[in-house]
Image (spheres, rainbow, N blue to C red):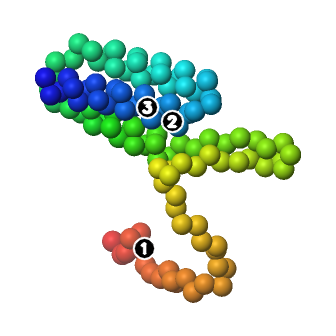
Amino acid sequence: MATRSKVLQVFKQLHRTREKVFRGDEIALKAGREKINTEFKSNKSLTDADKIQELITIGVDSEILLRKTIVQAEFNEEENVYELKITPDTALEKNTIFDPFADLPVQRKGKRCSDKPT
């Protein structure tokens, strides 16, 4: 019974995340709903506990991926730019400016395997 509740929990969490991530985009909302429902229905009759646990893990990982990596962009015609809708969950990387004068390690030029005598 615990497995069933975990499956339902992942199902509901995926739908909540879909609604949050794709808010305002009816096409993406519909496509996401259909994909989630199709995947869960196709595995409805599964009885192998290991396979079910594997699919639960995939569902949890998919939810995290959606929540942390998907951003929406809207075109602002007045300023001629795209504006991103970034949520607090969005994973951001630190962007640093490239320094063309930085001291980079020099790669050694040595013998290759093909240079060895036979």
Tell whether label 2 touches label 1 (CB within 8 Å): no
The crowd level at tag 3 (other Cα within 10 Å; few <14, some 14-19, many 20+) is: few
Q: Position of residue 52 (x, y in %)?
A: 21, 27
* Residue at which label 1 appears: 112
- Relative depth, front residue between 108 and 113: 108
Within-10-Å neighbours for mark 1: few <14, some 14–19, many 20+: few
Residue 9 locus on image (x, y percent): 29, 29
> Which numbered disc, 1 or 2, marks the residue that appears first in the sequence?
2
Identify whether 116 is placed above or below 21.
below
Above or below — where is 20 with respect to 7?
below
How many marks overall?
A: 3
Residue under the image location 57 percent in, 86 percent down: 103
Instruction: State the quadrant of the C terminus.
Output: bottom left
Q: Amino acid at mark 2?
A: Lys
The residue under label 2 is 20
SS category of the residue bearing label 3 = helix
